Each structure stands twice: as C-alpha cells, then as structure tokens.
Image (cartoon, grey):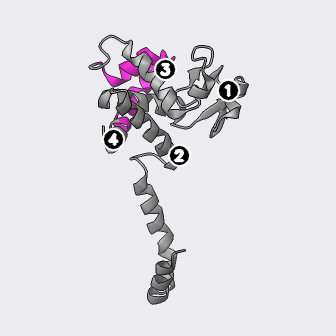
Amino acid sequence: MKFSSVVSYLALGVSAAIAAPAVEADIDRRANLPGLNAVQTKYANAIIAKAKADDVGSHGCQAAIATAMVESSIIMYANKAVPGSLKYPHDRIGSDHDRVGLFQQRASIYKNVKCDMDAACSAGQFFAEMKKVSGWQTMAVGTLCQKIQRSAYPDRYAKQVGLATNVCKAGGL
C-alpha cells in the first residue's frame, strides 16, 4: 500500500479504505485494452505490434484479434498431444487434436512449435497465410478469418469483429 493511500485513509476514515480496492481495480482495468483482461492484453499488444511490423493495417489486426478471440479467448494454450508445447510459457492446456497457441495453429501444419507458442511469431504466421488470400484487404473480417482458419464454425469470427475493432483502435491501428 502506498504511503499516500495510508495518509488518505487516516484523513478520510475507514469508509475510504473499504472503497479503495474498487478504485485500484478501475485503474488496472484502464491499463488493459477494451474488453480484455491483463493476460489477453499482453498477447493482443504483441499481435498489434506484429500487425504494425507486417504492415497489415487495422483490417489485418482485426482479423487476427477476432481469430485469436474465437480460437483461444486470446489465451496461450499448450497441448499434451504436442509435448514440445508444454516447454513454452502457456496459460492453459488444451486437447483439440494438435492445436496450440493463441490461433490454435496445427502443429502438424505449422511445424515450429516455439513460434506457435509465441504471440508475435504466431501472429506473423497468421498474417503470412492471410496475405495469400486474394482480396484480403477488403474482404469482410469474419469471412477472411474463416478463409485462413477453415473452421467448422465459420460464423463465430464475425461476432468478434466489434471487440477486435476496439482493441486494434486502442492499440493504434
């Protein structure tokens, strides 16, 4: 607890001390990107930085954030079926075939597990695939995500575009 907080509590009484945690929580929440917690924000910031570096603009950023939200809730997943993934920092362990990371990239296709388990590197893999899609720059974001991911649930991506737009905008794209 900061010294200034202690002085405030003494001056204002116990009711101020009880209310203080909510104020601190609000401050922490403002540090996060819109709609994301601290862990998600850390990964989203890496995706945004890679989007800037790869010059894919807000459209590419939105596709990546929407995809990561659908595939993993922007949480880093290792997978017991891919033992190498367990060696890298992760938040949870998944069990969907050989899918790992934020984008749930198949280790049998994306052979570099270290890259799959790194937010920026895996975003780079996503953007490389995205750039192979003809007309990606103007395609509806949800449609673009589906073209890249080839999901059994294609409608889920479009539902995350609003969040992705806000996150990318807050990140400077």
Q: Nearer the viewer, mark 3 or mark 4?
A: 4
Helix, strand or loop at label 4? It is: helix
Q: Residue at x 34, y 24 (%)?
A: 141
Helix, strand or loop at label 3? It is: loop
* Three-letter residue code for mark 3: Tyr
Helix, strand or loop at label 1? It is: loop
**Are the residues at dot 1 and dot 2 in contact (C-beta closer than 8 Å)?**
no
* Three-letter residue code for mark 2: Val
Q: Nearer the viewer, residue 122 or 92?
A: 122
Which corner quadrant of the image does residue 53 belong to? Answer: top left
Mark 3 surroundings: few (<14), some (14-19) or many (≥20) residues within 10 A: few
Query: Which quarter of the image is occupied by the N terminus?
Result: bottom right
Q: Is residue 94 left or right of residue 72?
A: right
Residue range in magenta is 139-164
Q: Nearer the viewer, residue 122 or 77?
A: 122
Helix, strand or loop at label 2? It is: helix
Between discs 1 and 2, the one toward the N terminus: 2
Distance between mark 3 and mark 1 Cα atoms = 18 Å
Where does label 3 land, which residue? 153
Q: Residue at x 46, y 38 (%)?
A: 46
Which disc number belongs to residue 95? 1
**Are the residues at dot 2 and dot 3 in contact (C-beta closer than 8 Å)?**
no
Q: Is 158 contained in the magenta span?
A: yes
Where does label 4 land, which residue? 166
